[in-house]
Image: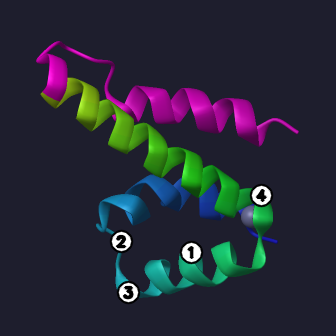
Amino acid sequence: MDCAKSIELLSDFSAGSLGDQDSIFVRTHLSACVDCDGVFRDLKLIVETALAMRSENGIAYPEEEVLWQRLSASRIVH
Ligand SMILES: [Zn+2]
């Protein structure tokens, strides 16, 4: 399994900024790997929540990138 590579690419993948080859790699990996698929779901939830809170409250909220780094750091260590 290429989990480390997959995790590394996930935030760009969710932003739609990956090239074709990397997108295919991530998509293929997510369909085969429950762990990374779970991380990807968490990431999407974080991004959506952060965006929703920012637009509802108009307050500065921690950047998705920061939350994502914190999440991936805690998930990778195992
Ligand atoms: Zn994986």
Disc 3/disc 1 C-alpha distance (Å):
10 Å
Disc 2/disc 3 C-alpha distance (Å):
7 Å
* Amino acid under disc 2: Leu
Labels 2 and 3 touching (C-beta < 8 A): yes
Say which residue appears at 44% left-offset and 53% top-offset. 11
Residue position for label 2: 18
Q: Residues within 10 Å of mark 1 (few under 14, many from 20)?
A: many
Disc on the earlier residue, 4 or 1: 1
Q: Ligand 1, what quadrant?
A: bottom right
Labels 1 and 2 touching (C-beta < 8 A): yes
Q: Which mark is residue 34?
A: none
Disc on the earlier residue, 3 or 1: 3
Residue position for label 1: 26
Say which residue appears at 30% left-offset and 68% top-offset. 16
* Amino acid under disc 3: Asp
Q: Residues within 10 Å of mark 4 (few under 14, many from 20)?
A: few
- Horizontal and vertical percent for residue 37? 66, 63
> Is residue 34 or residue 4 the one in the foreground?
34
- Most distant residue in the right direction: 78
For residue 2, what is the image quadrant?
Answer: bottom right
Scheme by which the image is coloured:
rainbow
- Horizontal and vertical percent for residue 13? 42, 65
Residue position for label 4: 35
Numbered range of the magenta stretch:
56-78
- Horizontal and vertical percent for residue 46? 45, 38
**Most frequent secondary structure within the magenta stretch:** helix
Residue position for label 3: 20
Q: Secondary structure at mark 3?
A: helix
* Label 4 beta carbon less than 8 Å to ligand 1: yes
Picture quarter with the N terminus: bottom right
Q: Is residue 33 left or right of residue 30?
A: right
Say which residue appears at 75% left-offset and 41% top-offset. 76
